Image (spheres, helix red, strand yellow):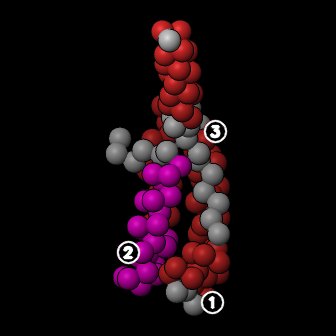
Amino acid sequence: MKKIVLTVMAAMSLTMASAANESCTVDYTMDVNMNSLSRSLSLSYEQRKAVESIQKTLSTDMLNVAAADESERTRLTHEALKHNLKKISAVLDRDQMRTYLRLLNITFVNRGIDLTE
């Protein structure tokens, strides 16, 4: 009985250790489904084209962040985000911008990118 309990405990600790390692990964790819984003923001045709271009720029900027040194990543992430928000705020109205910020924040959190530093 003691061996069974120890075996189960060892298996659980290995499982938890591997799960902890997986949760620390950061994904800097910012590819988005433009159909879903367009639908969520109720974009017009012109807005969709502009947002698509801005999102491609953000995606490229975030790939550059991923390739940068670890010490530079936070600064580069903030710069990419600031650049993105400046451009996108010129395209979206207030309600669309509020929804976009909510979606962008969720995306960053889900990808493991910490913006609080």
What residue is drawn where x is 49% and y is 16%? 5
Where 51 falls versus 71 (above or below)?
A: below
Q: Is residue 83 visible?
A: no
Q: Looking at the image, is mark 1 or mark 2 earlier in the sequence?
A: 1
- The answer to whether residue 9 is left or right of residue 95 is right
Quarter of the rendering occupied by the C terminus? top left
Most foreground residue, 6 or 49:
6
Where 92 falls versus 3 (above or below)?
A: below
The residue under label 3 is 67
Q: Looking at the image, is mark 3 or mark 2 earlier in the sequence?
A: 3
Q: Give percent across and percent down for residue 96.
A: 43, 81
Q: Give percent across and percent down for residue 60.
A: 65, 55
Q: CA distance from mark 3 to mark 1?
A: 33 Å
Q: Residues within 10 Å of mark 1 (few under 14, many from 20)?
A: few
Report the residue that reaches farthest toward the top: 3
What residue is drawn where x is 34% and y is 45%? 116
Q: Give percent across and percent down for residue 89.
A: 43, 75
Q: Secondary structure at mark 3?
A: helix
Q: CA distance from mark 3 to mark 2?
A: 30 Å
Range of the magenta residues? Answer: 86-111
The residue under label 2 is 98
The residue under label 1 is 45
Residue 114 occupies quadrant:
top left
Name the kind of residue labelled 2 in the image.
Answer: Arg
Report the residue that reaches farthest toward the front: 1
Name the kind of residue labelled 1 in the image.
Answer: Tyr
Name the kind of residue labelled 3 in the image.
Answer: Ala
Q: Is residue 5 visible?
A: yes
Q: Give percent across and percent down for residue 37.
A: 57, 75
